Image (tube, rainbow, N blue to C red):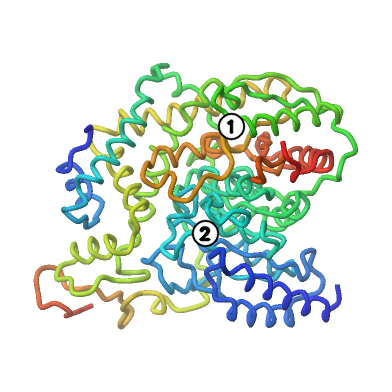
Amino acid sequence: MTEVEVLAAAKATATRLSKAKRLNALLTPPAVVRKSLVAQAKAVRASGVLYGMPVAVKDNICTLDFPTTCGSKILEGYQSPYEATVVTRLKAAGALIAGKANLDEFAMGSSTEHSAYGRVLHPLDRTRVPGGSSGGSAALVAAGAVPAALGSETGGSVRQPAAFCGVVGIKPTYGRVSRYGLVAFGSSLDQVGVLGRSVHDAARVLSVISGRDQRDNTCEDRDSLRLPTVPERLEGFVIGIPKEYFPVDLHPGVRRACDRAIRALKDLGAAIRDVSLPHTAYAIPTYYVIAPAEASSNLARFDGVRYGSRAAGVTTLADLYRQTRGAGFGPEVQRRILVGTYVLSSGYYDAYYRKAQQMRALLAQDFRNVFDRGVDLIFTPTTPTVAFKAGERTKDPVAMYLADCFTAPANLTGVPAMSLPIGRVKGLPVGGQFIGQPFLEDDMIEAAYALERAISGTDEA
Amino acid sequence: MSVTPEEVRQIAKLAELSVDEEHLPELAAQMSRIVDYIAQLGEAGGGGAGDHAKPFIPGPDAIRLREDVVAPQPLEGKISDFAPAFRDGFFVVPKLGAFDAGEETA
């Protein structure tokens, strides 16, 4: 691309983002994004591998050019004094930051209905949710406003909205990508992920943001991910199909789409093997002990002293904390802080937190047992249903949590996983999930390249 | 209900959250639903089997430590820019204990 073409593309992106405004997927005002994109296009170095590529960034990832609100009132207008490593790397590779994407407050949710700045609409059906918590990122990619966006995962927040919106979503191995500048939610689970309109778009952005970072000690000392070539065949791959991910009450359309994808994998030469991950049913209860426990600690920093908003008219320090947090956090965040405090409190720690950590190790052992027996990858549905109606699950937190039942195991165990479109049911996208071995994202991406070419993600299942 | 409104009030105090009295019953009901759901972990059996299973995620012993050297602050802006109130190198908060509303001191 020439400089003139990049500038024209930046302006076209701004126009597309403006047209997508009805989705409420972007928190940055369109005029601000336009001005920034034009300035970035004029200043960007032409040598980068993402030269001129607009990338939206989930609003829990710190940027210098735009505020970072985490979708919360408590951080309304908050301007970070530093930038996330992933954003610095995108810019260094020539990408243009296309504003901040809406999300469930502090990334807590599965529908992007829990943002203090209003819910995000599904691009194909406004009455439905786009998934969450990276619903804004997924909706922007699905609407064609940007080719890729950054999201974050704690329990499936990239893959689940990717599946609901019909785009590709990758959660890398825990430790593959720096989290410096990602606002912490559950520190033993959080990872930055990527959403893209194709496997290649998502994979090349992941390649750019991955690799060692001395500012994040949980980031492994490894080189950035090398992209595999697009394979003609999948001979030599052994793909496991875990029975626990195909329960009797699985949405029939999701099952049909998965069956078709499995047939395609077989036709490509992969060996298909039935496997078992026996502790899968305990993933969500385990997740909803560990994630809230970590969140209750991480979110203690938002106290009205050092960040964001502060309650007015308080008379004691305790009141300052309580009133600021009570007014600044939304209902779902408050609920999770309360649950986290409850499970860590005296008398309940052994019953819940310790038990959950034991179960987490058993879930990891499940994956290890399968991979140790020669299985390269696992294939499953990403979600048990297609995108659900807005408001359908907001009254019952457990029903909402179960939307992540097939994605949370990869977060709890740290393994990489990705979702790609494998068909549609009455026009709504279905996602298929590959789960890989730690730090072998290239195998997962290779299989996804082949499957993407073999089946149409927009055909009715 | 496994979690009572009184327990929610106590947990909220521990979590430094103000909760409206009128919302306590609803919160107690929602928390009970969640706590009852996660309680199935206790029925999972296996005793301490998980103690011996090896997780993929490395523990604190695997975390690399940086050299303890003074390095330039990576902040692009001043700390004072993002705090609600800052004066003479200190975050400014309301004084401990009761005093007139609105008064602040370092």
A58 on left or right of A293: right
A453 on left or right of A248: right
Residue A257 drawn at (x, y percent)? 70, 34
Q: Which residue is mark 2?
A: A120
Q: Amino acid at mark 2?
A: Val
Residue drawn at x 44%, y 42% is A400
**Mark 2 and mark 1 on one chain:** yes
Q: Secondary structure at mark 1?
A: loop
Q: Nearer the viewer, residue B57 or A364?
A: A364
- Please report, as a chain letter, where disc 2 is located: A
Q: Nearer the viewer, mark 2 or mark 1?
A: 1
Q: Which residue is mark 1?
A: A251
Residue placed farthest to the top in the image?
Answer: B46
Residue drawn at x 72%, y 61% is A147
Q: Is residue A373 above or below residue A402?
A: above
- Please report, as a chain letter, where disc 1 is located: A
A268 on left or right of B59: right
A200 on left or right of A217: right
Q: Disc 2 versus disc 1: distance between alpha carbons?
A: 24 Å
Residue B79 drawn at (x, y percent)? 41, 75
Query: Mark number for residue B22?
Result: none
Residue A304 drawn at (x, y percent)? 30, 68
Q: Secondary structure at mark 2?
A: loop
Pointer 2 and pointer 1: residues touching (CB < 8 Å)? no
Residue drawn at x 43%, y 27% is A358
Q: Quadrant of the N terminus of chain A?
A: bottom right
Residue A174 drawn at (x, y percent)? 58, 44
Q: Is residue A135 above or below residue A346?
A: below
Q: Nearer the viewer, residue A422 or A369?
A: A422
Which of the 4 image quarters holds residue A241?
top right
Q: Amino acid at mark 1?
A: His
